[in-house]
Amino acid sequence: MAQPQALPRLIAFAPSHFCERARWALDQAGVVYREERWAPGPHRILAKRLGLSSRTTPILDLGNGQVIQGSDHILNWTGLPGGDPDLEQRFEKRIGPLVRQFYYAAVLGNPRSGVREILFNGVSAVQALAGRLLWLRTRRVMMLRMNARADLLPVLTERVEAELAWFESMLNERGKHLVGHTFGRADLTAASLWAPVGPPPTHPVALLYSRVVLPPAVQASISGWRDRPGFAWVRAIYAHHRRSCEATLQDSVVPSRQPRSYPATTLKAARRAFTSAEIKRERGK
């Protein structure tokens, strides 16, 4: 693993389980970094300024001109052992996206779910302003791209059940750890990408998840899964291998207040205000 010349910057959405996968990998590898949270919507402008064609997070800016995008690439950079390419591929391409679709299908359609607030947790004041004014558009885009519709929840619940059964069969075959006899990247991948369905107490943003209001049927499903072997395993992995970062990150970032100096009332004005302020901030570095 090449050593960066400056303190790396992990760019993340606060509740993202793929961002948690990258965050955990950096912590596990002993990498000293700072986390910078971006707001959905304005993040597209910020990612473009980094020269990235994709707008997805997590992003690891090493500070030496090298930028690594995607939790899989960030894990590769850390060099953590204990990987299983086939199993990780299933989590990256199937289970992780399914968990995300299930979660957002449950909350994006309800303006009182609280999901907007946790997505904007810890972002800059300018991003918070722009993000809130762009939220209706951003929410529609998220629902469209993830196909996160409330009417799909019965089908998505069945799919989560099926993947959970598959995962529990893997645990029956492999035991406490998915690869070998010690904690490794396969364990980290599985635990982090399952976590939003039932965040363990030692999850760095567990308190944020607890603020979201879920539909009764979804909450009932999650409660029913809680004592399943798969989620008991997730909690045990977090309890034994994630406890060290809890005190440093557990909801320690308070959402920025909206600055009174930005009286934008339209989407166009909000974007102008955000872009101008970000340019000034970059020039001041």
Image (cartoon, rainbow, N blue to C red):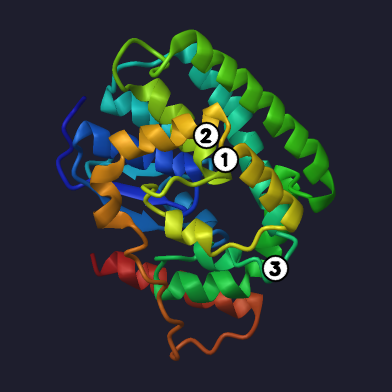
Q: Give the residue at mark 3.
A: 136
127 to 106, vertically: above or below? below
Q: Amino acid at mark 2?
A: Phe
Query: Spatial distance from mark 2 to mark 3, Cα to Cα?
Result: 34 Å
Q: Give the residue at mark 2.
A: 231
Which residue is found at the position 19% from the left and 36% from the top? Answer: 30
130 to 207, vertically: above or below? below
Q: How far from the left and from the top, in percent, is residue 97?
A: 62, 35
Mark 2 is surrounded, within 10 Å at the Cα level, by few (under 14), some (14 to 19) or many (20 or more) other residues, namely: many
- Helix, strand or loop at label 2? It is helix
Query: Spatial distance from mark 1 to mark 2, Cα to Cα?
Result: 6 Å
The residue positioned farthest toward the right in the image shown:
151
Query: Mark 3 or 1, which is nearer the eye?
Result: 1
- Can you say which quadrant of the picture contains the C terminus? bottom left
Mark 1 is surrounded, within 10 Å at the Cα level, by few (under 14), some (14 to 19) or many (20 or more) other residues, namely: some
Q: Is residue 39 left or right of residue 114?
A: left
- Can you say which quadrant of the picture contains the N terminus? top left
Quadrant in the picture for residue 250 = bottom left
Q: Give the residue at mark 1.
A: 226
Which residue is found at the position 20% from the left and 38% from the top? Answer: 31
Q: Front-most of 279 and 119?
A: 119
Query: Mark 2 or 3, which is nearer the eye?
Result: 2
Which residue is found at the position 63% from the left and 63% from the top? Answer: 213
Contact? badges 1 and 2 (CB < 8 Å): yes
Dot 2 or dot 3: first in sequence order is 3
- Helix, strand or loop at label 3? It is helix
Dot 1 or dot 2: first in sequence order is 1
Q: How far from the left and from the top, in percent, is residue 126?
A: 44, 74
| Residue 72 shows in this picture | no
Q: How far from the left and from the top, in percent, is residue 117?
A: 54, 68
